[in-house]
Image (cartoon, rainbow, N blue to C red):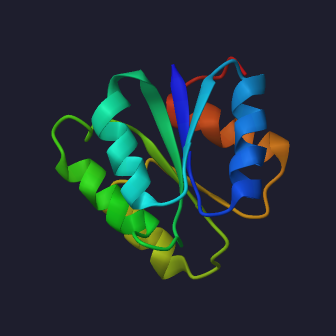
Amino acid sequence: MKILSVDDSTTMRRIIGRVVGMLGYDFAEASNGVEALDLLARDHADIALVIMDINMPEMDGITCLQSIKADPALQALPVMMVTTESDRARVIQAVQAGAANYVTKPFSHDDLVAKIASTLGSDEF
């Protein structure tokens, strides 16, 4: 199974990818919501979780999340949002749109592992 990281920051995708690999998952990545939706259209059966930034060019994370939740083939896929925002309104908007969880940057390795485990309903990490 794969975890998909969607973030316009190559560095952030690399950080998340390392954690995902340590947890034993394969890793997929996209730099914006448009790329993520294209990847999910081709490969959604292998994706266990999407970890997605809220602020990205072309298509932001909330718009992409809304598209995922509107698609019957994808709507059960858990999505965890990543944000640097202290603006609670954006986090609330993401949760209302169907986000399963969120983590605020900067985050520690342990914080990310705990959020992934919580989102996937596992305590085995």
Q: Which sits in the foreground, 9 or 52?
A: 9
In the picture, measured across the screen, residue 4 lies left or right of residue 98, that is right
Q: Is residue 83 above or below residue 44?
A: below
Side of 98 where 35 appears, left or right: right
Q: Is residue 106 above or below residue 40?
A: below
Task: Please tell me how many numbered marks the rendered image carries.
Answer: 0
Residue 117 picture quarter: top right
Point 47% across, 76% down: residue: 90
Q: Residue 119: percent from the left, percent from the top?
A: 53, 37
Relative to residue 50, is residue 35 depicted above or below? Answer: below
Q: Position of residue 44 (x, y in %)?
A: 34, 31
Q: Residue at x 20, y 34 (%)?
A: 73
Placement of 49 over or under 101, stated as above or below: above
Left or right relative to 116: residue 105: right
At a point 61% along the width and 23% down the height, the residue shown is 26
Q: Position of residue 36 (x, y in %)?
A: 42, 49
Q: What is the quadrant of residue 109 in the picture?
A: top right
Q: Nearer the viewer, residue 14 or 86?
A: 14
Between 53 and 112, the residue placed more toward the observer is 53
What residue sits 67% from the left and 72% below the top?
84
The quarter of the image holding the C terminus is top right
In the foreground, 17 or 88? 17
Q: Please state the horizontal and vertical placement of residue 93, each as a whole percent of the image.
A: 39, 72
Answer left or right for 109 relative to 83: right
Question: Residue 87 sits in which quadrant?
Answer: bottom right
